[in-house]
Image (tube, rainbow, N blue to C red):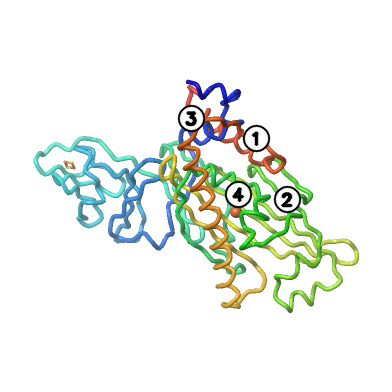
Amino acid sequence: MPDQAHHPDRSPIRDVQSYIGLPLIYNHWYVAGFDDEFGEMPKAKTLLERSIVFYRTKAGELTALQNRCLHRSFPLADGTLNGDNLVCGYHGMEYDPDGRIVRIPCQDRVPNRKLKKYPLRKQGPYIFIWMGDEDAVDESKLPDFSFLGDPQYECVHEEKFVEGSYLLMMENLNDLTHFSFLHANSFAFGEYFGRLETEAGKDEEGVYCYRLDRDWKRQTERLPPALQEKLKGKEVLNRNGGVNAGPGLFKGFSPLYVYGADGEVEMELKTYVMHFVTPETKTTAHYWWSLCRDYGLGNDEAKAATKALFSRAFDEDLWAIRNMQALLEQDHADYEELIIAGDQAGMLFRREVLEWVKAEYPEFR
Ligand code: FES
Ligand SMILES: [Fe+2]
């Protein structure tokens, strides 16, 4: 292996090729899709290299089952429905919405076997899925994203696709020093952004990173004029960043604090920018983003402009990740990853990912 000479440290913490090669981690919640994309007709999706069939019972209950007939691996989404039961399109084996076999047409005996069933939870417009074993489901690992369905917030949402490892995307999200460069034509932040005072660490929610900006002009110039007027002469502070709240859950948060004459916070304008990245395979991922805010509401034109701006910026991230993934796969020579100041949270998150991998794969301990 001549390559090895160029890789003094192949640990997944110091080496992105090893990092994105880590096995997928299942005992966590991921987004499966928008609630309204799932109807009564069976729909198959591949999440974390598992083919899953989703359908709703007549009562509207959404179910997610292993999309593989227990007989000969026919994909059940290509079968038919008999009431609430899924009928395999090959030899007609019938499963109830919990995945239990209820009928085998060519015999009387019905073995006590069932398909793997995936627990689902709804928050706002999203369906979250537990990818681990049904009896190991951990509600405490599902963060509270209730603002996604809270009428006090106005939200925009969009689905995209990542042609690269979900880990590259998650790392992109907790390092905003790329704003000034990769997003020079969208967010258009100056180089100052990467030098702002930074708070990075890990708390009960996960690995976080925020950049602190107290510049009045920068913080108010994109606000609606009426709000700008209201904030005249006030001290402001923006904490821009977020937390990696799971392997594929990123809770971006960018509150603007407005201080009164007594130095107390007088107003807080909240903006959440959520990113949900669910691996399809190790090298591709489903991706949804949502932006929710509790100010400047009711202006459809502004809402559409915000959605267009963020969508364009996130396409820039996807372009970068596609190109990085391709290069990482093609060329392994003369390469040793350099770590810089903006990587603080990225490094912490790599450590956390490695801990999650160790918890599921004894060979990594
Ligand atoms: S493959 Fe499904 S019944 Fe045979
Ligand atoms: Fe970005």
Image coordinates for residue 24, horizontal then vertical, percent: 46, 36
Residue 114 located left or right of residue 17: left
Residue occupied by mark 4: 173
SS class, disc 4:
helix
Residue displayed at 55% across by 67% down:
307
Residue at screen point 48% across, 53% down = 287
Q: Is residue 75 above or below residue 293?
A: above
Of label 2 and label 1, which has the lower sequence position?
2
Q: Quadrant of residue 203?
A: top right
Checking the image for residue 338, the label placed there is: 1
Mark 3 → mark 2, Cα distance in angstroms = 36 Å
Q: CA distance from mark 1 to mark 4?
A: 18 Å
Classify the position of the C terminus by image quarter.
top right
The mark found on residue 194 in the picture is 2
- Residue bearing mark 3: 360
Spatial separation of the CA atoms under disc 3 and disc 4: 25 Å
Q: Position of residue 126 (x, y in %)?
A: 47, 57
Q: Nearer the viewer, mark 3 or mark 4?
A: 4
